[in-house]
Image (cartoon, rainbow, N blue to C red):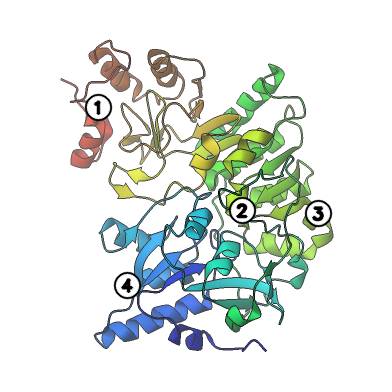
Amino acid sequence: MIPRITAQEAAKMIEHGDSIGFSGFTPAGAAKVIPLAIAEKAKAEHAAGRPFKIGVLTGASTGRSLDGALAAADAVLFRTPYQSDGELRKKINAGEVKFFDMHLSQIAQNVRYGFLGKVKWAIVEACAVEEDGTIVLSTSVGTSPTYCQVAEKIFVELNAYHPKELKGIHDNYQPLDPPHRREIPIYKVSDRIGSPVIKVDPSKIAGIVETNLPDETNTFPEPNDVTIKIGKNVAAFLAAEMKAGRIPKEFLPIQSGVGDVANAVLFAMGSNPDIPAFEMYTEVIQDSVIKLMSENRIKFASGCSLTVSNPVLKQIYGNMDFFKPKLVLRPQEISNNPEIVRRIGIVSINTAIEVDLFGNVNSTHVLGAQMMNGIGGSGDFTRNSYISIFTCPSIVKDGKISTIVPMVSHIDHNEHSVQIVITDRGIADLRGKSPHERAEEILNKCVHPEYHPILSAYLNHSKQTHTNHTLSMAFRMHEEFAKTGDMRKVQWS
């Protein structure tokens, strides 16, 4: 019989230097009580003068009880592949935690290949677990199937907050590793190719910790004037593409990033009468997806996690007969798989921190040095999408920062992968354009009026080469902000 234990008993078994694969893709389905107990153990060990840190692998970001608690306890040896916790971010940027950013589709295979070392423990949240080693995950899949496969031992957080009726919403599938890998047989968004459960040797499960806790998800703010304009511009662009015959009349699956801009974009698409009801093949299923699904504007959503507010999650749980046939949760190496993205023709819509005049995008670093969250899955989708779109407000910080700059301070997506840039000011279509043409398109369509003369002067000052850059001036706007707090004060002479 698999033992029932406490979170503290689980933490006692974990040793300094252990690498742990945690469930969770965003706070949805993230382990909660065992990481809190590990954090308390770390504090006690440090107080006794002993070292205690663990390697932390997850699906993506997690909740405050995992990343936040472990970071606050100085218990993180390294972290991958993505994070969004403020306390952890401070330690990463201070050089106190080693963080390696990674495309989310690659973490599972890199673990199986042995590139990231031995995974000692898997700690996964489930809504059901059987004595034969059958595990039914909760609100996310992430990398849990791989962590359960490769880990020496497993702890299961059995969370009664999530009903056992979730069984059937998951589609757990792992591709074979090279040289035996075959095509992944997903040809439409709703295809199911795996198992609704994870099966492990029950002797690997070192203990079950019973909990009853909601996910630590946050609600996003209501759309504002800027995000509404961005959303309407995206919807207008897609409707025009469809009218021009560049998107088929039955439309194409949509991938959308996470956050207030992403929600505003989906709401705008849902309210545009020229866009038919559509499907999502994405990572994170947000509140906006469920709302549009209940209005029959989204027909089906394939994702990696149900990252919805708790009221919306209760709405799903209270109406499973309606929602369950329209949802599937997959491992992230499948939800983000480049082969599938290209095959089924996904339109990707992601958010940029900054975009330069030639179409390069920075998704991860503020002023080129301070890590924000990580690249996430945006690269998985962007490089392989039918149409790749990046959105951002034209200005932030009360106009002190232009998100359009001469040269991005860090490149995550280069000009070869970025097709469309959309801000609250307009739509820049970069397809089939030379660097000079791209710069003019972005300048005239996406730049805020306050920055138009500034960026125009930069282009005019630059030598007429294939790409108009003056190296001594390319980061002067960033330098001006670092010095005075306002990019508008930049001087080119």
Label 1 – label 4 distance at C-alpha: 38 Å
How many residues crowd mark 4 within 10 Å: few (<14), some (14–19), many (20+)?
A: many
Mark 2 = which residue? Answer: 176
Q: Measured along the vertical axis of the image, is residue 162 above or below residue 98?
A: below
How many residues crowd mark 3 within 10 Å: few (<14), some (14–19), many (20+)?
A: few
Label 1 – label 3 distance at C-alpha: 51 Å
Label 2 – label 4 distance at C-alpha: 37 Å
Q: Measured along the vertical axis of the image, is residue 215 above or below residue 81?
A: below
Mark 4 = which residue? Answer: 74
SS under mark 1: loop
How many residues crowd mark 1 within 10 Å: few (<14), some (14–19), many (20+)?
A: many
Mark 1 = which residue? Answer: 474
Label 3 – label 4 distance at C-alpha: 43 Å
How many residues crowd mark 2 within 10 Å: few (<14), some (14–19), many (20+)?
A: few
In the image, 79: left or right of 304? left
The residue depicted at 31 percent of the width and 21 percent of the height is: 455
Three-letter residue code for mark 4: Asp
In the image, 403: left or right of 490? right
- Residue 175 badge: none
Mark 3 = which residue? Answer: 325
